[in-house]
Image (tube, helix red, strand yellow):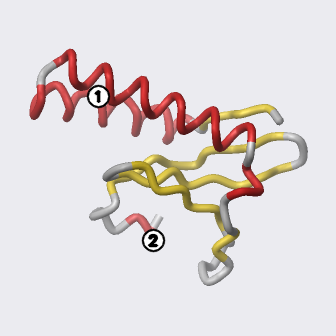
């Protein structure tokens, strides 16, 4: 499947990197971003491995990675990542 990140998801990755640099330094922030890349490839390769959460207004798939969650859906032959949010955020409102 084709993996596509929405502009909001790309912005989330940039924000995660900036916050990582602020809290842990650039080297650690880069490592964490690389790990996010691996998780995104997993989601792109095996989207069905992540349960569909139909309790939300619009059903989505939610994959947890460390402190963050990758929110995505399968649309045709694409895996569309809508957001990448911190697990403590009120991401359900989006």
Please tell me in which quadrant of the rendered image residue 91 appears.
bottom left
Q: Nearer the viewer, mark 2 or mark 1?
A: 1
Secondary structure category for the residue under label 1: helix
Identify the image quadrant of residue 45: top right
Task: Find the distance from the CA under tag 2 to the CA under tag 1.
Answer: 22 Å
When asked about the image quadrant of residue 15, the answer is top left
Residue 18 point in image, percent of width and height: 23, 28
Look at 29% across and 28% down and name the residue there.
17
Disc nearer the start of the sequence (2/1): 1
Element under label 2? helix
> Local crowd at mark 1 within 10 Å, few (<14), some, or many (≥20)?
many
Residue 68 got which mark?
Answer: none
Percent x, y for residue 67? 31, 52
Q: Is residue 61 above or below residue 37?
A: below
**Percent position (x, y) of residue 47?**
73, 50
Q: Residue at x 40, y 39 (%)?
A: 12
Q: How many marks?
A: 2
Residue corresponding to mark 1: 17
Q: Residue furthest right?
A: 76
Q: Is residue 89 left or right of residue 10?
A: left
* Left or right placement of residue 35 versus residue 42 in this view: left
Residue for badge 2: 92
- Residue occupying the point 40% across, 33% down: 13
Instruction: Check the image and name the residue furthest to the top.
Output: 27
Pointer 2 with pointer 1, Cβ within 8 A: no
The reply, left or right, for residue 7 in relation to residue 23 is right
- Circle 2 packing at 10 Å, graded few (<14), some (14-19), many (20+), is few
Quadrant housing the N terminus: top right
Q: Position of residue 88 (x, y in %)?
A: 27, 64
The relative height of residue 33 versus residue 8 in the rendered view (above or below) is above
Q: Is residue 75 left or right of residue 80?
A: right
Residue under the image location 62 percent in, 83 percent down: 55
């Amino acid at each position: 499947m084709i993996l596509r990140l929405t502009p909001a998801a790309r912005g989330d990755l940039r924000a995660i990197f900036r916050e990582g640099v602020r809290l842990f330094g650039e080297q650690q922030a880069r490592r964490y971003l690389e790990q996010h890349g691996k998780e995104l490839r997993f989601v792109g390769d095996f989207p069905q491995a992540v349960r569909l959460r139909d309790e939300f207004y619009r059903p989505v798939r939610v994959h947890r990675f460390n402190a963050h969650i990758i929110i995505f859906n399968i649309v045709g032959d694409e895996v569309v990542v809508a957001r990448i949010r911190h697990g403590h955020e009120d991401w359900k409102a989006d």
